[in-house]
Amino acid sequence: MGKIIAVANQKGGVGKTTSAINLAASLAALEYKTLLVDADPQANATSGIGYDPGDISKSIYECMVDGVNIDDIIVHSNIDYLDLVPSHIDLVGAEVEMINLPNREEKMREVLRAVADRYDYVIIDCSPSLGLITVNALTAANSVIIPVQCEYFALEGLGKLLNTIKIIQSRLNPQLEIEGILLTMYDVRLRLSNQVVEEVKLHFQQMVFDTIIPRNVKLSESPSFGLPAIMHDADSKGAISYLNLAREIAEKNAVLAK
Ligand code: ADP
Ligand code: MG
């Protein structure tokens, strides 16, 4: 069965979507069958790999709430080995609709476990909240990647996120692990960036990925071409850093599987 990894941090703008898209595309480039799940009604991951959320009528939420078959929703992207479960903007109301459902925290797990055996990796891009959809993603996942931006207030909100993860581990998903803390938007020239790296490594030690994602314009402009950076400019620092992250994750999981 494929590994389900949620990319989560309730803070916006820390690089969740950029990481989800580019990690998924890099795993696919390494020929791992990968499913990218857009679990954010803002649908940035959907548009970032070239789909117009305006053309999308069904998303993971319809599977969770209305029992729609996920196979009717998965789209085969233009990238080999990469499929997408898209999202669209109208579905902000899904959380409200779900409140009265039985096992409302486990809906995404039911949906994704049914397809996870067809993939090597399932990567979930979470919304910037700790609401019910994100709780669903963390309940469905085997592990979580926490992007942390190398900026002021980098650690703000992390305590709350780690606490939420603990609660989910104790009540809903005992197997949930932290895949790693991912430092993003690192700028080697900035003292602040270097300070954040030091501080995060001091606090979280081996939980931090060796790979650090630099601030790179190819990463910020590639979504406007509907492409992951590896397709937009494979030689860019941004594309290479996510490929390194994919290798780091694949190697770690291969070692653990032995
Ligand atoms: P989130 O999903 O956590 O809200 P995004 O991935 O959308 O964060 O990133 C926020 C903004 O920062 C976007 O405009 C994105 O293009 C940009 N960005 C993210 N990572 C990088 C990076 N490594 N270098 C340059 N820009 C980045
Ligand atoms: Mg996002």
Image (spheres, helix red, strand yellow):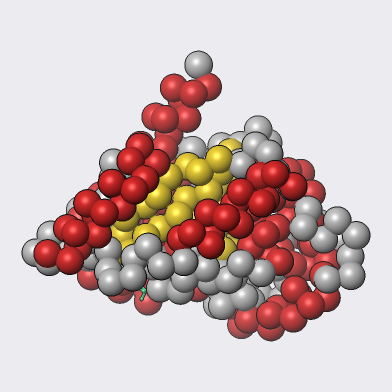
Q: Residue at x 83, y 71 (%)?
A: 99
- Residue ranking furthest to the top: 258
User: Position of 116 compared to 51: left or right?
Assistant: right
Q: Nearer the viewer, residue 70 or 75?
A: 70
Q: Residue at x 49, y 38 (%)?
A: 32
Residue 21 on image: x %, y %: 45, 59
The answer, for residue 68, to whether it is visible in the render is no
The image quadrant of residue 188 is bottom left
**What is the quadrant of residue 180 in the picture?**
top left
Residue 251 in the image: state x and y as whole percent.
Answer: 39, 29
Q: Is residue 60 left or right of residue 28?
A: right
Position of residue 150 in the picture relative to residue 127 (left or right): left
Residue at (22, 65) in percent of width and height: 216
Q: Nearer the viewer, residue 102 or 168?
A: 168
Left or right of residue 224, residue 238 in this image: left
8 or 158, nearer to the observer? 158
Please state the horizontal and vertical placement of residue 72, each as a whole percent of the image: 76, 59
Q: Answer above or below: position of 139 versus 33.
A: below
Which residue lies at the image location 66% right of the left edge and 69% below the top edge? 131
- Splitting the image into four quadrants, where does ligand 1 fall? bottom left
Instruction: Decide: is 81 above or below 88.
Output: above
Q: Residue furthest left?
A: 189
Q: Quadrant of the N terminus?
A: top right
Can residue 150 be seen?
yes
How many numbered dots are placed on residues in this image?
0
Percent coordinates x, y for residue 184 in the rendering: 31, 60
